[in-house]
Amino acid sequence: MHPIAAELLAGAEREVDDLDVEQIVDVSAGMVAAGRGDEVLAAVREAGRELGAAASLQLPASAHQPIDWAPFGTVVPVLAGSPGAGASCVAAALADALQLAARCVLIVDAADPARSGLAGAASAEGPWTSQISAHTAIRFSWRDQALLARVETDLPAISPGLVPPPPEWLPRVDPLHVTVVDIGHDGWRTTANPLLGAGGWLRNGAPAPRPVLVVRATRPSLRHAEQVLARLDSWVSSGIAVPPAQLAVVGAKKWPAGVAGAAGRRLDGLLDDAVFVPLEQSLEIGGITDELLPDRVLDAVTPLLTGLGLFPESDRSRSRKARR
């Protein structure tokens, strides 16, 4: 066994997901190579303790019991179907469109802070934190009038299993109309175990979450997404998780010739209602900043929100005119 993995497991003192071990070992190995071995091994042992503590917060015995999502309003997890699909962009667009329509919105950024697509989504870090453990906290900031929550840690990395479970993200805001979740981790890893960490946002409950699967308009992206859905299949069949309700296609206005045919049987049912989200050059180059996304992008996600039953198209138009 790799010595870093052994140190991690020693800290956890219980079984942890192999994917979490792999990710933390990958990050830590580079730090060891840079001559920070003693420091890293101590941090890895702490990461193991955090993984053990995170697992204890999420009780497998209650796996078949629906989650009470009501305090979060309607939960919309945004899941990347392939690497670089643009899930953070879609999550930001959904949240911006909703807040312009006078909805009270919580944005959950569940990504490893070092790799988050929403790292620049707030103009300043908010002063309000919720301490989860000795090394992990959730910080709440503002993105215009939407509340943005994200992980803070001094650990080497936040793997999917280290993401605090959904109840820990609930702010003191009442009522919340919608919670948009940028799951922020590779879809293949996240869907491996919806009982733990970032995958917990896909858990079944009342009202049921309405996941959005994000892809690019390419054959490789659709093939990746099919495998993500295949991995989620057994959890959906057992009633533990919910399948995607909508498909968002980023960076295109329509399917290029021959691309849609690459969709497998699980993805095929989402193609007819797919929503295309073109990206402006400024967004592709500069990423997501603290400015609300361009109107063209928000207009593109309006049918998606309407399809999810969150508001009629006319609502956002009126709110945007009043505030811009």
Image (cartoon, rainbow, N blue to C red):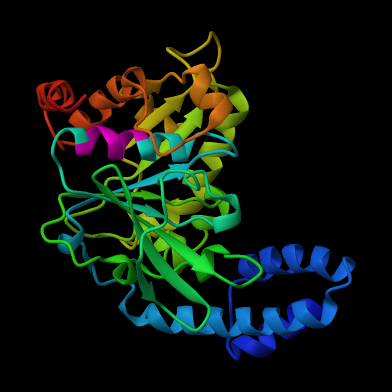
Task: Using the rendered view, name the quadrant where residue 72 is placed.
Answer: bottom left
Q: Main secondary structure of the magenta part?
A: helix
Viewer-side residue, 219 vs 211? 211
Does the magenta run of residues contain 94?
yes
Does the magenta run of residues contain 304?
no
Residues rendered magenta in the picture: 93-99
Q: Compared to 180, does 288 lie above or below?
A: above
Q: Position of residue 126 (x, y in %)?
A: 36, 59
The residue positioned 47% from the left and 16% from the top of the image is 252
Task: Using the rendered view, name the quadrant where residue 15 is placed.
Answer: bottom right
Viewer-side residue, 203 vs 319? 319
Quadrant for the C terminus, please: top left
Q: Compared to 79, does 71 lie above or below?
A: below
Quadrant for the N terminus, please: bottom right
The residue positioned 41% from the left and 78% from the top of the image is 132
Q: Position of residue 227 (x, y in %)?
A: 55, 43
The residue positioned 35% from the left and 82% from the top of the image is 61
Q: Position of residue 152 (x, y in %)?
A: 49, 66
Q: Is residue 263 visible?
A: no
Please give left or right for residue 232 compared with residue 64 in the image: right
Viewer-side residue, 171 vs 161? 171
